Image (cartoon, grey):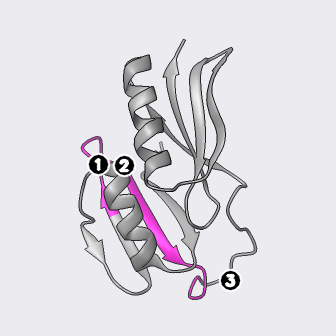
Amino acid sequence: MLQPTYTLLYVDDPEASGRVYAALLGRAPVEAGPTFVLFAFEGGMRLGLWSRHTVVPAAAASGGGAEVAFTVADDAALEATHAAWAERGLPILQPPTEMDFGRTFVALDPDGHRLRVFRPG
């Protein structure tokens, strides 16, 4: 059985996006270069930031067509993350809001990729 192990985001400048994600994730990438930056997580999942200018075959999609979601334990963690990301200048697409699945907010990375943080309901 296949199991997803990577999420790849096509970005304009992987090194610049890598710096943003390193700050948001509180970790350094395990691989970094001008066309690709990779973050690895304890559960085996990986997040790759790939230059949209070097993807083969060329990617037609841009930011906003999907989300990278992050689960937090409680409302305090959600509010603290929201405040920290807003302070860093990330555009906030949706402020903290109670929804049917829990409390959530959505920010945008420099390429317009949606970053959802949520506390399950």
Magenta segment includes 53: yes
Q: Nearer the viewer, residue 46 or 19?
A: 19
Give, as a single range, the part of the protein colored magenta.
39-55
Question: Residue 32 in the image: x percent, y percent?
Answer: 31, 77
Image point 52% across, 28% down: which residue?
A: 118
Q: CA distance from mark 3 to mark 2?
A: 24 Å
- Disc 2: which residue: 45
Magenta segment includes 42: yes
Question: Residue 102 in the image: x percent, y percent?
Answer: 58, 17
Q: Quadrant of residue 14?
A: bottom left
Amino acid type assigned to the residue bearing label 3 in the image: Ala
Q: Residues within 10 Å of mark 2 (few under 14, many from 20)?
A: few
Q: Earlier in the sequence, mark 3 or mark 1?
A: 1
Q: Earlier in the sequence, mark 3 or mark 2?
A: 2
* Residue 53 against residue 78 in the figure, above or below: below
State whether residue 93 appears in this view: yes
Q: Are marks 3 and 1 in contact (CB under 8 Å)?
A: no
Q: Nearer the viewer, residue 90 or 114?
A: 90
Circle on res. 41: 1
State whether residue 4 appears in this view: no
- Disc 3: which residue: 58
Amino acid type assigned to the residue bearing label 1 in the image: Phe
Q: Helix, strand or loop at disc 1?
A: loop
* Picture quarter with the C terminus: top right
* Residue 70 against residue 25 in the figure, above or below: above
Question: Residue 89 in the image: x percent, y percent?
Answer: 50, 56
Q: Are marks 1 and 2 in contact (CB under 8 Å)?
A: yes
